[in-house]
Every structure is written in C-alpha cells, then in structure tokens.
Image: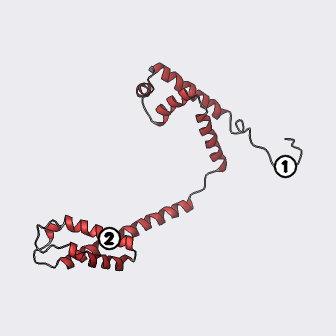
Amino acid sequence: MNGKTPGFNVIGQLAALRRYALSLVRNPDEAEDLVHDALVKAYERQSSFRTGANVRNWLMSILHNAHIDRLRQRRSLERRHDAAAELAERAMPANQDHSVRLTQLRDAFFGLPEDQRAALHLVAIEELSYQEAADTLKIPVGTLMSRVARARERLRTFEQSGPSATVTHLKIVGGTGDDKQ
C-alpha cells in the first residue's frame, strides 16, 4: 500500500473488493465496512504477501476471511443474547412493594440536607475514606463524621418507620364505601 512491495496494487482492486463484499453481505454500508476491515488486515499483513503472487486473489481471500470472522462474531453475540434472554425469562419481576420502598428510600436520601447527602454519598456510595471525603468537601474530618452520622440516623429512622408511614399522598380506592377521604 505504501509502494514498498512491487505488484502490490491495492487501489486497482477496490472495485472488485467492493463487488465481492456486496455480494457477501447484501448491504452497501456493511460491504464498505467489510472492505475497510479487509484492507486494514491486508496492510497489517503486507509482509506476508509473496512477490509475484496474485494480489487480487490474496485480497479476496482476506476479505472472505474477514466476512467469516464477522459471521462467527455475530453468531456468538446472538448466542449470548439468547442465553441472557432465557435467563431474563426465568427471572421474577421485582416485587411492586419492594420497588415502591426503594423509590421511597431514594426520595428519603435525596430529602437529606445537601451537606449530609454529599457526605454520605462520598463515604457510603463512592467508598472514600473519611479523610478523603473530608478533603473533597474541604471540611474537617470530625464535621464529616458528624454529617454522615446524622444522615445515617435520619435514614435509619425512615427505615424503622415502615413502608406505610411515608406514603401520605396515596388514596384508597374501592373498599366497602365506609372510608371517608
């Protein structure tokens, strides 16, 4: 490709490579990608080209092998996706109550004062040491520890209050009609 190997005229073979690639994949964009991959491989393996050999046959062989590699890769990916889909079908959907509770817990976390939320996030989620978190927030370690303790206590109180204590915006629908809301 850089003219070092005599008889290595790749540019003159582009039309034939494109035609062959298009016949293999039947999609112009995929064919261009396939030709590109084959040319990259040819350039990388230029030293294996024997002087006097037919460059067209050599390039066609590389293109064909690149196509086979892509097919194998696609089949492997499909098998992995099928296996994942099979596992997903066997998995149970999340319990609705659990999902609601997680949403409530997330809301409780975001309801913390900003200084407590930031301190707890750095220590509990980002797993920074107290010193690293204090340096990040530019506060003393004792202040950070106090904020984390207060945030944890508020979340602990939330958790101990139970799922029904925080649901104030829901209305009971149905029932016997004795409910007055």
Q: In which quarter of the view is residue 170 placed? A: top right
Q: Residue at x 27, y 79 (%)?
A: 16
How packed mark 2 is, by other alpha carbons closer than 10 Å (few <14, some 14-19, many 20 or more), is: many
How far separated are the C-alphas under marks 1 and 2? Answer: 65 Å
Q: Nearer the viewer, mark 1 or mark 2?
A: 2
By what rule are the colours in the image chosen? secondary structure
147, 14: nearer the viewer: 14
Relative to 72, residue 174 above or below: above
Residue 173 % position (x, y): 81, 48
Relative to 40, residue 153 above or below: above
120, 36: nearer the viewer: 36
Q: Residue at x 44, y 34 (%)?
A: 127
Q: Is disc 2 placed on a helix, strand or loop?
A: helix
Residue 82 % position (x, y): 48, 66
Q: Is disc 1 placed on a helix, strand or loop?
A: loop
Q: Residue furthest right?
A: 178
Residue 112 % position (x, y): 59, 30
Residue 175 tag number: 1
Q: Quadrant of the C terminus?
A: top right
Q: Is residue 173 left or right of residue 2?
A: right
Q: Quadrant of the N terminus?
A: bottom left
Instruction: Tell me which numbered mark, 1 or 2, is placed earlier along the sequence.
Output: 2
Q: Is residue 164 left or right of residue 33?
A: right
Looking at the rendered structure, the kind of residue marked 2 is: Leu
Looking at the rendered structure, the kind of residue marked 1 is: Gly
Check disc 2 and report the residue beneath it.
34
Residue 97 visible (yes or no) = yes
